[in-house]
Image: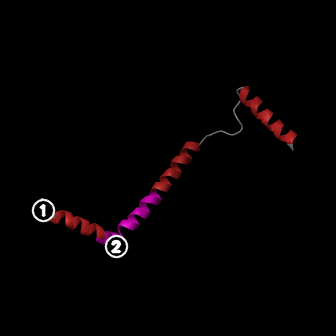
């Protein structure tokens, strides 16, 4: 098994040093990272929307706004 691993490493190094393309490219990697970031952001936005529009949080936010508007300067 060790000989097989060394043979693969040697082939990969020789291929990379000779200017040939590596076995695995990074094509599409950036696009998939952006897609995962967008999915995570949308999921966070949905959770935040659900929390803010819940009854308890909505009532608390209304109370804060009411206190701010009723405050004397």
Kind of element beneath mark 2: helix
Give the CA separation, mark 1 to mark 2: 26 Å
Quarter of image, res 64: bottom left
Q: Position of residue 6 (x, y in %)?
A: 82, 37
Mark 1 or 2: in front is: 1
Q: Is residue 51 magenta?
A: yes
Q: Residues within 10 Å of mark 2 (few under 14, many from 20)?
A: few
Residue drawn at (43%, 62%) of the image: 46
Rendered image coloring scheme: secondary structure
The extreme left residue here reads: 73
Q: Residues within 10 Å of mark 1 (few under 14, many from 20)?
A: few
Q: Position of residue 20 (x, y in %)?
A: 71, 29
Residue drawn at (76%, 34%) of the image: 12
The reply, left or right, for residue 21 in relation to residue 66 is right
The reply, left or right, for residue 29 in relation to residue 48 is right
Residue drawn at (80%, 33%) of the image: 10
Q: Earlier in the sequence, mark 1 or mark 2?
A: 2
Kind of element beneath mark 1: loop
Magenta span: helix, strand or loop, mainly?
helix
Q: Is residue 61 above or below residue 24?
A: below
The extreme front residue here reads: 73
Q: Do the numbered discs 1 and 2 sit on residues whose CB atoms are within 8 Å?
A: no
Q: Position of residue 36 (x, y in %)?
A: 53, 52
Q: Which residue is mark 2?
A: 56
Q: Which residue is mark 1?
A: 72
The reply, left or right, for residue 37 in relation to residue 63 is right
Residue drawn at (36%, 71%) of the image: 54
Rendered-image quadrant of the N terminus: top right
Q: Give whichever of 9, 27 is nearer the camera.
A: 9
Q: Give whichever of 59, 13 is nearer the camera.
A: 59
Magenta extent = 42-59
Q: Position of residue 33 (x, y in %)?
A: 54, 47
């Amino acid at each position: 098994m060790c000989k097989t691993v060394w043979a693969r490493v040697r082939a990969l190094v020789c291929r990379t040093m000779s200017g040939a393309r590596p076995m695995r490219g990074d094509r599409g990697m950036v696009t998939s990272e952006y897609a995962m970031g967008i999915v995570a952001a949308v999921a966070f936005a949905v959770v935040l929307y659900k929390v803010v529009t819940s009854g308890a949080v909505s009532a608390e936010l209304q109370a804060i706004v009411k206190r701010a508007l009723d405050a004397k300067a």
